Image (cartoon, rainbow, N blue to C red):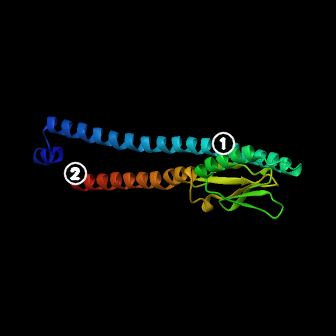
Amino acid sequence: SSFAGLAASPGDQTTRATTLGRATAFADQVRTTSNRLQNFRTDLFQQARELTDQINTKLDSVAQLSGRINQARAVGEEPADLQDKRDAALLELAELVEINTYTDGNGQLVVQGPGVTLIQGDSARHLSLDIGNDGALRVMAETVAGNGSDITHFLSGGQLSGVITVRDHDVVEMQGELDTFAFHLANEVNAVH
């Protein structure tokens, strides 16, 4: 190893240059890995934004179809084709974020999302993303007052939950492990040399 050679011949300029070159290359690799992890978090943020947009589009579609279904039923029609479209949209929505559906006492579709009602009849509630003080993503459900209600801790399934878990838990943990490794290695090298 370079350090063993340096310990055996501390005055040898070639050995010193080789050791320094290898140490610099290693530090560059650690820095590159750290940068890649940060870029991956940025990419996951963008992916979460795209998923949130897709969720909102699906919510609007389901709410609109529910309104049309209710209008058709009000005039005595049986809108099977609209129900099929709504069911397909609900299946796609369920892949993006966990949902539960039921019909209320007025025959209106209700879609419960993570800790919030997302659709009631033909009205949809949109989701948005925010970044907390700790850098973690927060999923906000719009409220009547216009403020967002943080529902992040209710997320437990769907693609959005998975992306947020990877970004704000897994990648953060990997970054912490890399930082700890680099810190301990630097301390060990400094202690020996």
Name the residue type under label 2: His
Label 1 neighbour load within 10 Å: few <14, some 14-19, many 20+:
some
- Which residue has dot 1 on it? 53
In the image, residue 157 lies at what x, y percent? 56, 57
Tell me where residue 46 appears, x and y as whole percent. Answer: 57, 41
- Residue 149 in which image quadrant: bottom right
Crowding near the residue tagged with mark 2, few <14, some 14–19, many ≥20 C-alpha atoms within 10 Å: few
In the picture, which quadrant includes the N terminus? top left
Residue located 62% across and 50% down the image: 91
Q: Is residue 156 left or right of residue 56?
A: left
Depth check: give the residue in front, 62 or 82: 82
Q: Considering the numbered disc 2 on the image, is that residue within a helix, a strand or a loop?
A: loop
Task: Determine the secondary structure under disc 1.
Answer: helix
For the residue pair 149 and 98, the one nearer the viewer reads as 98
* In front of the other: 7 or 115: 115
Q: Is residue 60 visible?
A: no
Residue 166, x across and y down, in percent: 49, 52
Observer-nearest of 72 and 3: 72
Q: Residue at x 14, y 48 (%)?
A: 4
Of the numbered discs 1 and 2, the one sitting upstream in the chain is: 1
Q: Residue at x 62, y 58 (%)?
A: 152
Quote the CA–CA distance across marks 1 and 2: 54 Å
Residue 193, label in figure: 2
